Image: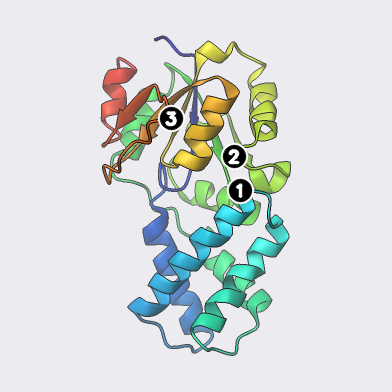
């Protein structure tokens, strides 16, 4: 299949979010003189995953997301901390992290000039734009579509509507969605009628009800699909 546009997810696909998250959380705990250990990190990851799932399903707003996850975290850890103040500090720390998945810079550079590249992310604007600026990737992407700015998150079709409008409304056959999340990236792409490539480094089982176009375990495999 020949594509003109590649839509990349950000966290977990281009950016090493787990590494950035742990570093930002540790630095924020230190800033507030709070004890930090593996339990703190594991608890936050579980809480954060559940809160983002609520957001993707429309159960909470992005404004609520910013503080709810820390309210739940500090309740679980039995810590008395103002969630809103901590959230601001954490987002500043996270925005300063431009950690990339290994091999991403080489892949994106290989795609550049052969394809038009855009990022479409369920993220927070004050984090994602800073992280892109701190990385080596910014110059390669035409635009970044951020759910926080759009008011819609993958898999909702509205965020894809915005992306397609900014791309000049190409044919859907000309667009490939690449991401690590089945519920947002892959489901969103399938719902919108575009081809999908699931980045699945953990080799998780593929649900039988998701007819994905491609599945890869390493990003370098995308070069074969795209004939790079």
Residue sticking out furthest to the front: 208
Q: Position of residue 215 (x, y in %)?
A: 32, 29
Q: Which mark is residue 154?
A: 2
Position of residue 129 relative to residue 79, above or below, is above
Q: Which residue is mark 3?
A: 210
Q: Earlier in the sequence, mark 1 or mark 3?
A: 1
In the rendered image, residue 82, in percent from the top left (x then y), is placed at: 65, 83
Mark 1 lies on residue: 56
Q: Is residue 116 above or below residue 202?
A: above
Q: What residue do we see at 44% from left, 63% from top?
A: 21
Q: Is residue 209 left or right of residue 159?
A: left
- How is this picture coloured? rainbow
Q: Earlier in the sequence, mark 1 or mark 2?
A: 1
Decide which of tag 3 and tag 2 comes sooner along the chain. 2
Q: Nearer the viewer, mark 3 or mark 2?
A: 3
Distance CA(mark 1)–CA(mark 3): 18 Å
In the rendered image, which quarter contains the N terminus?
A: top left
From mark 3 to mark 2, how far is it between C-alphas? 16 Å
- Report the side of 148 relative to 180 (left or right): right
Q: Quadrant of the C terminus?
A: top left
């Amino acid at each position: 299949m020949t594509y003109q546009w590649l839509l990349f997810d950000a966290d977990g696909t281009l950016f090493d979010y787990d590494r950035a998250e742990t570093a930002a959380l540790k630095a924020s705990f230190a800033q507030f003189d709070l004890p930090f250990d593996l339990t703190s990190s594991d608890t936050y990851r579980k809480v954060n995953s559940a809160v983002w799932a609520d957001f993707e399903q429309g159960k909470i707003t992005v404004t609520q997301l910013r503080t709810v996850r820390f309210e739940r975290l500090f309740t679980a850890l039995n810590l008395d901390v103002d969630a809103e103040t901590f959230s601001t500090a954490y987002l500043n720390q996270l925005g300063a992290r431009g950690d990339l998945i290994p091999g991403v810079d080489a892949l994106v550079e290989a795609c550049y000039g052969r394809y038009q590249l855009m990022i479409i992310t369920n993220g927070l604007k004050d984090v994602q734009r800073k992280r892109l600026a701190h990385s080596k990737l910014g110059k390669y992407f035409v635009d970044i579509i951020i759910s926080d700015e759009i008011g819609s998150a993958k898999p909702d079709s509205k965020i894809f509507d915005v992306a397609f409008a900014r791309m000049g409304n190409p044919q859907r056959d000309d667009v490939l969605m690449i991401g690590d999340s089945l519920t947002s990236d892959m489901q969103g792409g399938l719902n919108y009628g575009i081809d999908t490539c699931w980045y699945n480094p953990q080799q998780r089982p593929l649900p039988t009800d998701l007819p994905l176009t491609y599945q890869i375990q390493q990003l370098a495999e995308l070069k074969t699909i795209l004939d790079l």
